[in-house]
Image: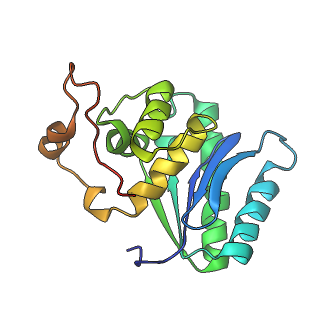
Amino acid sequence: MIKPNEPILALDPAGLTGWAHSTAGSGVWCLNDYESRYIALRVLIHAIAKQHGIGSIAFEDAMLGAKNFNTQGYHAELKGVILLCCAELKVEPFLFAPSTIKVFATGNFKAKKDQMMAACARTLGITPIDDNHADALFILELAKRPDCWAMSSKQRRKFMPKANAKQQTFFKVKR
């Protein structure tokens, strides 16, 4: 369980990895260089831990949503690096399925990238750099809300937006 006031690093691991820290900002890391991407991810995670602290790492288990075998493999490799960092930093990992993040953000299990970005601007008041950044911001918010981690299908339907309700959102952020 994530402890209150514990620094959280949220990641959406991919070639362009979205990241969000509970106290140190957010952005996108470019990990497209095949030769160094795993080392770069590890170095970036450790740098955030050294500068701002990390009590837990929450991230998307993107392997679950990938249809392509090569993409699944790549996501599994990134997941391995993140889990290694968790072990080295002695922090607990929290993994979220893509559908859990999408329903939390939009109420729609199959939300598209543009819908996730629009939901980020609407509900969090942040214009994301790209869809990876939006996902990381929602992973951070989801990590703070363990009451939303496991929902029955009946509970999920309760939060699904109505077809004609454009402004309905899954949650509201207090400022």
Residue extending furthest toward the front: 175
What residue do we see at 34% from left, 36% from top? 106
Quarter of the view holding residue 10: bottom right
Horizontal side of 55 relative to 78 (left or right) equals left
- Of 69 and 54, which appears nearest the observer? 54
Q: Residue at x 43, y 41 (%)?
A: 98
Residue 103, horizontal then vertical, whole percent: 32, 40
All told, the count of numbered labels is 0
> In this view of the protein, which residue sits in the foreground, 99 or 63?
99
Does 102 appear above or below 94?
Answer: above
Residue 149 position (above or below residue 75): below
The answer to whether residue 116 of the structure is visible from this angle is yes
Give the residue furthest to the top: 164
Q: Quadrant of residue 130?
A: top right
**Quadrant of the image for the N terminus?**
bottom left
Q: Is residue 37 above or below residue 2?
A: above
**Against 163, is 15 above or below?**
below
Point 69% across, 40% down: residue: 16
Q: Quadrant of the C terminus?
A: bottom left
Percent from the top left, x then y, of residue 152?
A: 17, 48
Residue 72 seen in render = no
